[in-house]
Amino acid sequence: MRPLYAILFVTLKYALRIFYPRIKTVNSPKGFFGNTIYVSNHCASFMDPLVVASYNQPILFFMTRSDVFTPISRPVLWAAHSLPIYRQHDGVNTKNENEKAFATCIKILKSGRNLLVFGEGFTDDIFIRRLKPVKKGAVRIGFITLEALNWEKKIYIAAVGCNYSDPNEMRSDVLVSTSDKICLNDYKEQFQANPNKVINELTKRIESLMQDQITHVEDKNWLNFHENIMKLTRKGMNAKHSDTNISLIERWKYSKQLATWLNNQKEEQLENLQGLKDEMERYFSLLRKLKVNENCVHELSVNGKLNRAKELAYLFILFPFAILGFLHCSIPYFIVKRFVEKTFKRRVFWASVKLILGMIFMGLINIPVIFLVHYFFFPSYWLGFLYYGLIGVFGLAAYMWWINFVRFKEKGMIEKMNLSKIVSKRNELLEKIYSLIPVA
């Protein structure tokens, strides 16, 4: 394990837990070694390797697109276990360069360590709950390794699914699910007889296993329908409209079941759902137009009124910690935010890069705090280090204070509005959902 990887393995858990308070793993592999190729979906760009590596035990080496390897970034990426993979439009001799990369992969798997390959090859600009076609590279690497080792060592492959309520939304959820392993050695005879056929069949099998680990909505036209159902029922993995009293695993299962049911509907059955689909889109469009939060409509439908006591309590309790958070974190936060949003044109990169740079910048800029605490408050470096370690928590307190302040004001404005018709419409939509969709 290279030093930077070891440091990130420890520190990222802290940063990720602040960003994603609810993190779960399903069927997580045990042990640092395993000579396994893990093939993951790639819905959140740089965030995916951070999450998978931090919350699974195996030591991983990442196959990373070559264009991010610059003279400045290359040493850092090397130290973080990243390996370049070259694509046709990268402007190099991809065959020769990838042969070098594959030779490194062979050494890694031979030594008992593991590879993480993002089978889709790229990330969409907008987060969607859908798996793109999986490429053959991961399976091909496995068989190249076996041939180089004369089939004398067992090499495995497994599917990984990263499930986010929203990868770019702070204080949302993430669940990482891993399939059982497939031993590639079991396919020796078939591969030697017809390698292309075996590679194609296993790639399809891995793709199917990856779909089993995530929410996969086959038809893009029904992605919003699936999301709107989760918002209204509050049972799924929507970032802002979910009942967090339901366990994350149950909400993940609900999201998958709903997608599976939707995928199994025939064309005429989907036509029967079109009316409900249009009604929900009009409902959420109206809420956006009126600037009304659906959570407030839900609270009105359940309780008949809005209660701001919870937000007010948070504002008082968090206030002293929030002051410390604003003091230590606000300047580095805005510097990192401005830099990332000007440098990276694709929003899909923002959350992960902000997380890493924010962790590094806030960590560095606040190092003097250790000595200030020692000399001016408590003559103990241990207390200085403890306070330093809590700065991330203070930053979270500042964020949560601001969120509750916004909610407090929002509820105050909505209390002045007559939303009885919208509440009735919401209840009507829920009745239709439960009557038309058995899994809802």
Image (cartoon, rainbow, N blue to C red):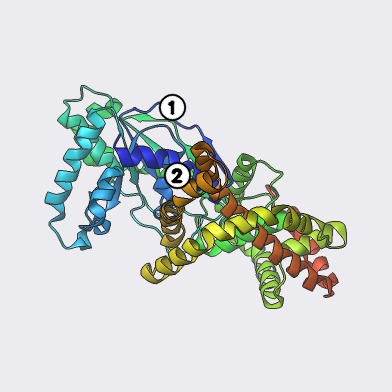
Residue 321 located left or right of residue 306? left
Q: Work out how far the residue at label 1 is from the one at label 2, CA to CA, in angstroms.
A: 19 Å
* Residue located 36% across and 30% down the image: 182
Camera-nearest residue between 429 and 11 = 11
- Locate residue 104: give its quadrant: top left
- Furthest toward the bottom, the residue is 289
Q: Where is residue 78 in the image (x, y as percent from the top left)?
A: 25, 46
- Quadrant in which the N terminus appears: top left
Residue 11 in the image: above or below residue 282: above
Q: Which of marks 1 and 2 is nearer the N terminus?
A: 2
Can you tell which of label 1 and label 2 is closer to the viewer?
2
Camera-nearest residue between 49 and 190 = 49
Q: Position of residue 406 (x, y in %)?
A: 69, 66
Residue 84 located left or right of residue 330? left
Label pair 1/2, CB-CB below 8 angstroms: no
Q: Position of residue 218 (x, y in %)?
A: 50, 55
- Locate residue 268: give its quadrant: bottom right
* Residue located 77% across and 64% down the image: 297
Residue 413 located left or right of residue 325? right
- Name the residue carrying label 2: 12
Q: Which amino acid does label 2 sit on?
A: Leu
Question: Considering the numbered disc 2 on the image, is that residue within a helix, a strand or a loop?
Answer: helix
Q: Where is residue 158 in the image (x, y as percent from the top left)?
A: 38, 35
Circle 1 crowding by C-alpha within 10 Å: few under 14, some 14–19, many from 20: few
- Furthest toward the top, the residue is 152
Question: Considering the numbered disc 1 on the image, is that residue within a helix, a strand or a loop?
Answer: loop
- Name the residue carrying label 1: 30
Q: Which amino acid does label 1 sit on?
A: Lys
Residue 293 can be seen, yes or no:
yes
